[in-house]
Amino acid sequence: AAFDDYKNKYALQQKLVVDLEVAEAKLAEVVQERNTLLATVKGLEDMVRMLEDKLKES
């Protein structure tokens, strides 16, 4: 019975490791997506600022 417990715990640990690796990969994906969106927003903010400046000049 003790060996079965050990086997079950080991299998659970292996599953946890895999789950963690999947979660890490997903997190990296989400962070990359966020960085892309932040860059897009910054570009749009710069454009708005430029257009506002043009309006002030006219």
Image (cartoon, rainbow, N blue to C red):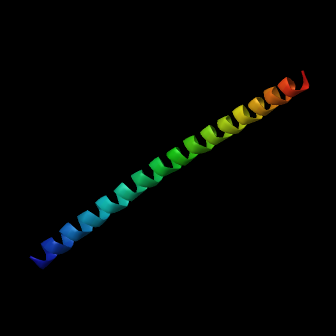
Q: Nearer the viewer, residue 22 or 10?
A: 22
Residue 41 % position (x, y): 66, 37
Residue extending farthest left: 1
Q: Nearer the viewer, residue 1 or 43?
A: 43
Count of labels in the image: 0
Judge whether 15 appears above or below 32 on screen: below
Judge whether 25 appears above or below 13 on screen: above
Residue in view at x 45 percent, y 47 percent: 26
Q: Nearer the viewer, residue 36 or 18?
A: 36
Residue extending farthest right: 57
- Asked where in the image residue 11 lies, by quadrant, the reply is bottom left
Report the side of 45 relative to 4 (left or right).
Answer: right
Residue 33 % position (x, y): 56, 41
Q: Which of the image's four quarters has the N terminus?
A: bottom left
Residue extending farthest top: 58
Residue in view at x 52 percent, y 50 percent: 28
Judge whether 41 appears above or below 11 on screen: above
Residue 35 % position (x, y): 62, 44
Residue in view at x 62 percent, y 39 percent: 36
Residue in view at x 76 percent, y 30 percent: 47
- Asked where in the image residue 37 lies, by quadrant, the reply is top right
Residue 52 % position (x, y): 80, 29
Q: Nearer the viewer, residue 35 or 53?
A: 53
Q: Which of the image's four quarters has the C terminus?
A: top right
Residue extending farthest bottom: 2
